[in-house]
Each structure stands twice: as structure tokens, then as C-alpha cells.
Image (tube, helix red, strand yellow):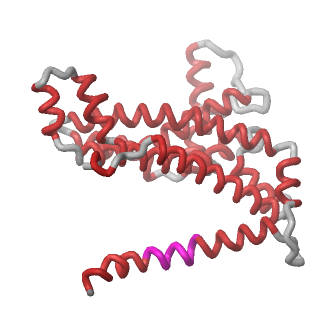
Amino acid sequence: MYSKSLPYMLLLPATLFLCIFFIYPFTLVAWQAFTTDTGEFTSSFFQEMASHWKFNTALINTLLLALAVVPFQMALAIYMATLVNGMKRGRDAVLYIWTIPLGISDLAAGLIWLAIFEQSGFLNSFLHTLGVVEQPVGFLGYENKGIIFLAIVLAEIWRATSIVLVILVAGMGLIPKEYAEAAEVFGASRWQRFTRVTLPMLKPSLQTAMILRVILAFEVFAVVVALGGTNLPVLMSEVFTWQYELRDAHVAAAYALVILAISIAFTLLIMWALRVPKGARV
């Protein structure tokens, strides 16, 4: 009897934590998005959000950033994890160095890349030294939205690839070496062993890493504010604007629910695309 109830007892603290710190705040946010100050149900806050001139721009910018960052980041992390996993000496030192950005906050990462791209930054100094430019260039000015977008993509790749790397290195460590050795015995090339043995068995880790990274990509905020200010609106920056600058918590809550809905939709899509049959799990 005790052994049957033990798993549920162990899950109880996590369940209570979720109820207190997720479900209750979520209910409050949903209530705020769908009701007026007098308690009447309405969809007017969603209509106000959707009709605002910044909404479509913020939504497109958020999706484009996720599309530009996540696939490249996943490919880079797989390559780095393969290198780390194949090392016989110095593996831990290399892994520690590559995961240093994990200890840096979003805002600090944005400020580091701001020091590179701003008018008095390293990039302008470097180009001036080479004689490429005579005067400092305003790379992050309003007229250079493409460069702002590129700077944010670079900062996000630099900052968050290590999150994916750690998950994939742990996943590769769980794959029994006998599978790759057996494939090698039967004449499989290195590329074939990677694509037909490692990648399929890495699916659970890929699924976890991609879900985590996509959700974080939809919540990007501090890096965008540091590098782009209000020149490149994204959904999270609009939540901040409506909550603290326009003082309209109802529309801010509507934005928050849209971000949550997009995150859930992409999570379900990734879980379906990278689903692993029960019999194939390590």
C-alpha cells in the first residue's frame, strides 16, 4: 500500500508548487484579460490588442527571431555536443568554457553586444582602424533594422546555445556505445552512424532542448530592449509597454495569453514531430 502511494507523495510537492505559482497567477491573468474592472466578461481587450499598429509587427518579429535563432542554434549545439562527446582529454574544460554564457543574464548579454555594435563600440573602432569607415556608423539606428535584427540573433545564439548544448551532451552520454560499435562493425560510415544511430536515439533530448529553446525564444525581451530599444518591437516588449508605460493591465494580460498560446501550440507541434515510440526509448 505504501509503495503504491509513494510516487504520488513524491509528486505532491511539485504539484502544489505548480498550483500556487502557475495555475493561480495564470487564472488571475486570464481573468484580467477577459473581464473589465467591474467584472463583466469581454473580448474588447483582445480586439484593442489586435487592432493596435504594433501588434502585427511585434508578432512577426517574434516569430522571425525564433525562426532565425532556434534552427541554427540546434545545429550548432549538436555539432558542439558531438565534438565534446568525442573528446578523450580536456572534455570537461571545453564544456565549462562553452557554458560560460549560461551564467550571464539576458540583459548583461544584450549590453555586451551593445558594446560591440554601438557608435563608440568595438566594431566601429575595428572598422576605423582598418580604414573601412571614416566616421562611426550608427549600426543600431532606426534606419538599420536589419542590423538590429542581426545583432539580436547573434546575441541570442551566443547567450543561449549553451542551454541546448548541456541537454544534448547529457543525452549523448546516455546512448550505449555498443550501438555505434555494432554499426561500425557492419561497415557504417561516421556520417551513417551519426544520422542512423545517434540522432534517432537523441530524440528525447532534442525534444526537450527544442521545446525549452522555442519557449525562451518567444519570451525574448531584455536582449531586444538592450540592442533595439523600441525600434524592434516583440511580443514581450509590448507586454512591458502596455503594463508599465500605457498603464493598461488588461491589454498586457491579453498579450501574455497570446504568448502562452503560441508557446503551447509550438510545444505540441515539437512533441508530435519528435515523438519517440515507447519501445525505442533508451
Q: Which residue is nearer to you in this view: 277 or 268?
A: 277
Quadrant assignment for the N terminus: bottom left
Q: Position of residue 143 (x, y in %)?
A: 79, 27
The image quarter in which residue 250 lies: bottom right
Q: Quadrant of residue 40?
A: bottom right
Q: In the figure, 104 relative to 31: above or below?
A: above
**Residue at 14% in and 26% down:** 184
Locate residue 252, reporting x and y percent: 77, 60
Q: Position of residue 72 (x, y in %)?
A: 49, 31
- Image height check: is 54 above or below 6? above
Depth check: give the residue in front, 233 or 205.
Answer: 205
Q: Position of residue 209 (x, y in %)?
A: 43, 47
Q: Would residue 109 be visible to someone looking at this image?
A: yes
For residue 114, side relative to residue 253 (left or right): left
For image coordinates 22% across by 44% down, the residue present is 175
Residue lying furthest left: 185
> Would you say 91 lies left or right of 75 here?
left
Residue 43 drawn in magenta: no
**Quarter-wise, where is residue 69 in the image?**
top right
Residue 172 appears left or right of 213: left
Range covered by the magenta-colored residues: 14-22
Q: Main secondary structure of the magenta part?
A: helix
Determine the residue positioned at 42% across, 79% down.
12
- In the image, what residue occupies the spot 85% across and 70% down? 41
Q: Nearer the viewer, residue 156 or 62?
A: 62
Of all residues, the one furthest to the top in this rendering is 131
